Image (cartoon, rainbow, N blue to C red):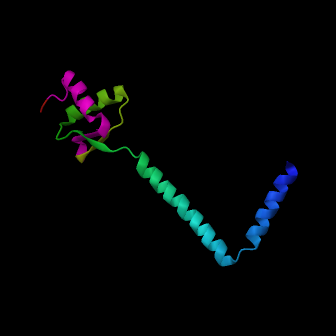
Amino acid sequence: MNEKLKQYFANASNFWKSRSKKQKTIFLSSLALIVLLASVITFFATRTKMEPLYSNLSPEEVGSIKQDLDSRGVKYEITDGGTTIMVPSDSVDSLKVDLAAEGLPKTG
């Protein structure tokens, strides 16, 4: 087994040494491009799409809703100068119903 592994690395080394500088550059550039594309695709495929849960809220309402979301373990973002709460798009409807049952927000 060890001998086969040594032979494999020797063949790979000979193959690499037999390539021209241009071929090596093209190979490494292509490899870097593939890694970059895979990273970009992974980033966009796994990114959570956020949508407004409520907007034009008072600071008190934002605080109450934030506290409730924290206790539920829901990921959120506060935007628009602290007046809008953004949550994952697949959670908006159920959170609105749950928060309404608790009387949140107080206005609107």
**Image quadrant in which you'd find residue 55:** top left
Q: Assess whether residue 20 is covered by the magenta stretch.
A: no
- The location of residue 54, given as percent across then percent down, is 21, 37
Q: Horizontal placement of 66 versus 107: left or right?
A: right
Residue at x-position 31% and y-position 37%: 90
Residue at x-position 51% and y-position 55%: 38
Residue at x-position 42% and y-position 48%: 45
- The location of residue 65, given as percent across then percent down, is 26, 30
Residue at x-position 20% and y-position 32%: 61
**Image quadrant in which you'd find residue 107:** top left
- The location of residue 17, given as percent across then percent down, is 76, 71
In the image shown, does 7 or 53 lie closer to the viewer?
Answer: 7
Q: Horizontal placement of 102 versus 45: left or right?
A: left
Query: Quick check: can you spot residue 88?
Result: no
Q: Start and end of the magenta stretch? A: 81-106
Q: Horizontal placement of 97 versus 27: left or right?
A: left
Q: How many marks?
A: 0
In this view, the residue farthest toward the left is 108
Q: Is residue 3 above or below residue 88?
A: below
Q: Assess whether residue 98 is covered by the magenta stretch.
A: yes
**Image quadrant in which you'd find residue 9:** bottom right
In this view, the residue farthest toward the right is 3
